[in-house]
Amino acid sequence: MKKIKNMGLSNLGIFHTAIGVIALVAGIVSLVKNGKIDLSQLSGKIYFYGTVITSVTALGLSKNGGFNVGHIFSLFILILVVIAFVLAKRNSGNRARYFENFFLSFSFFLSLVPTVNETFTRVPLGHPLAKSPADPLIGKTLLVLFILFIIGSVFQFTKQRKNNRMTQA
């Protein structure tokens, strides 16, 4: 495959990155607007379909050749969003909403792991922020994102419990 000079992205890599960025932006929009990734809203649908496409295209990418941890991440993310989609479509009751919210938020967090790694080791061109995936900057950034994920999950759980109580009343 033809690669872009300096960044080492194949055509599939460019497509994967573009769709991934769109999915992440849609996820952020849904989280800000709804406090969760809501699959009944346009932003949630874009997140879902974009994440599915990004996860599948990730299976065709490899810096080192062969199956690697990134492929496991993409398969796990794919499983999470598909299960959340099934829960949303089946209208499995109030308790299922907890799992749906958690799976979508966890898939969002997991999507940020390779995103941070790839971005920090490639940008800015010629002088990337991090020298390797083991760079402390990547670790610290992921730690902050993990703490935000925990805080967001507690918020979603609390909000969902309140919504469940209101629908039962």
Image: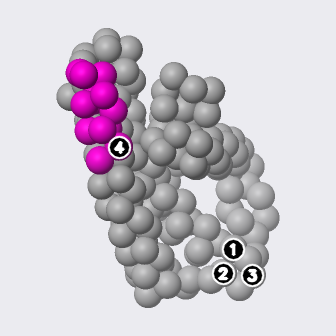
Marks 3 and 4, how far apart in space? 45 Å
Residue 165 located within the stretch drawn in magenta: yes
The boundaries of the magenta stretch are 158-169
| Residue type, label 1 | Val
Image position of 169 with respect to 118: above or below:
above
| Residue type, label 4 | Lys
SS at badge 4: helix
Q: In this view, does 96 lie to the left or right of 111?
A: left
Identify the disc placed on residue 159. 4
Measured from the top left, where is residue 108 in percent x and y? 45, 49
Q: Is residue 89 visible?
A: yes
Residue toward you, 108 or 20: 108
Q: Do the residues labelled 3 and 2 touch (CB within 8 Å)?
A: yes
Classify 10 Å Cα crowding around label 3: few (below 14), some (14-19), many (20 and above).
few
SS at badge 1: loop
- Total of numbered circles in the picture? 4
Classify 10 Å Cα crowding around label 1: few (below 14), some (14-19), many (20 and above).
few
SS at badge 3: loop
Marks 1 and 3, how far apart in space? 8 Å
Image position of 94 with respect to 3: above or below:
above
| Residue type, label 2 | Pro
Disc nearest the viewer among 4 and 1 = 4
Identify the disc placed on residue 123. 1
Identify the disc placed on residue 60. none
Residue toward you, 34 or 141: 34
SS at badge 2: loop
Marks 2 and 4, how far apart in space? 39 Å
For disc 3, the marked residue is 126
Q: Are marks 1 and 3 in contact (CB under 8 Å)?
A: no
Does label 3 or label 4 sit earlier along the sequence?
Answer: 3
